[in-house]
Image: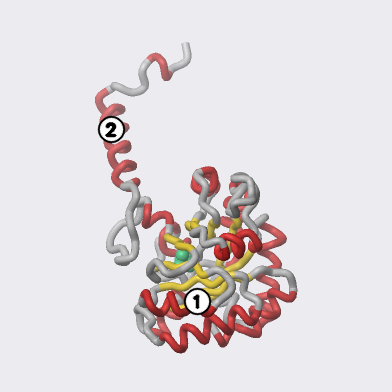
Amino acid sequence: MSSKQSPSARVTTASLAQMARERQPITMLTAYDFPTAQALDQAGVDCLLVGDTLAMVVQGHETTLPVTLDQMIYHAEMVGRAAERALVVVDLPFPEGQMSIERSLEAGARVLKETRCQAVKLEGGHEQAARIEAMATAGIPVMAHVGLRPQNVHQDGGYRVQRDTERLVNDAISVQQAGAFAVLIECVPVDAARQITEALDVPTIGIGAGPHVDGQVLVTNDMLGLTAGHLPRFVKQYAQVRETIAEATRQYCDDVRQGRYPESKHSFQ
Ligand code: KIV
């Protein structure tokens, strides 16, 4: 949010650029449903991402690959309805950003037309420049995603920190030149993220990329403590929602089994 903007003014691609210029850190979190998106938006997060991590943290798959465009749009509609201030970005799921440019244009157009969300995110660097240029020219704002690309998990043989700084910087410059309004950088060493941010005019948003970026993003389910099992080392947990749910459920079951619920105040006479 710019210092000249009211706290409730809608965040746009332009205001994100202004925040980066004014060195105001940009906050971004994932969202997949109406109530969570509403809570995050009202708490003041600048950007919401309907991430294809939906496949993992909501649908229970092992990778992001299975989620379909129709499923992303279904969830993006909920988030788009909830967000009054945050800019909402929607991931193009595999393989919408890997097939023909026409297919990506159609997918991006569906996102803007059907969901009230304002931008898409596309994994890839230099090799995606022509696609990003076509989408930006068509009026579809694109956040590029460089570094670790989860949709490439099988090609890369796993999820690894990306350490080829020269390639990372070149990828980021290419996607900026192609028209990306921001660049998400995933799992790169601190110094690589710093070099990328220094090389770019558009905002950089990091995840597992250290502090020298214009903003940070986390998967909400991870940072709220809702995800079971192993978490990447870059995740900071701000709550233990899974445990809160389990404890509330234990108390409810106990109350019903012991005849403590419902009481007369919960009943109609
Ligand atoms: O899909 C997603 O949640 C992402 C993360 C890197 C934030 O892209």
The residue drawn where x is 47% and y is 61% is: 54
User: Residue 62 at x, y = what percent?
Assistant: 38, 68
Q: Secondary structure at mark 1?
A: helix
Question: Along the line of sight, which residue is nearer the eye, 185 or 213?
Answer: 213
User: Residue 69 at x, y = what percent?
Assistant: 59, 67
Q: Residues within 10 Å of mark 2 (few under 14, many from 20)?
A: few
The amino acid type of the residue labelled 2 equals Gln
Q: Secondary structure at mark 2?
A: helix
The residue drawn where x is 55% and y is 64% is: 20
Q: Quadrant of residue 110?
A: bottom right
Dot 2 or dot 1: first in sequence order is 1
* Horizontal side of residue 131 vs 127, given as left or right: right
Q: Is residue 126 above or below residue 45?
A: below
* Horizontal side of residue 66 vs 162, given as left or right: right
Q: Is residue 203 above or below residue 163?
A: above
Residue 71 is at least partly visible in this image:
no
The residue drawn where x is 38% and y is 78% is: 191
The amino acid type of the residue labelled 1 equals Glu
Question: Which residue carries the number 1 mark?
Answer: 198
User: Residue 209 at x, y = what percent?
Assistant: 40, 71
Question: Which residue carries the number 2 mark?
Answer: 251
Identify the residue at the far right of this view. Answer: 138
Cα distance in 3D space between marks 2 and 1: 52 Å
Question: Along the line of sight, which residue is nearer the eye, 239 or 95?
Answer: 239
Residue 32 is at least partly visible in this image:
yes
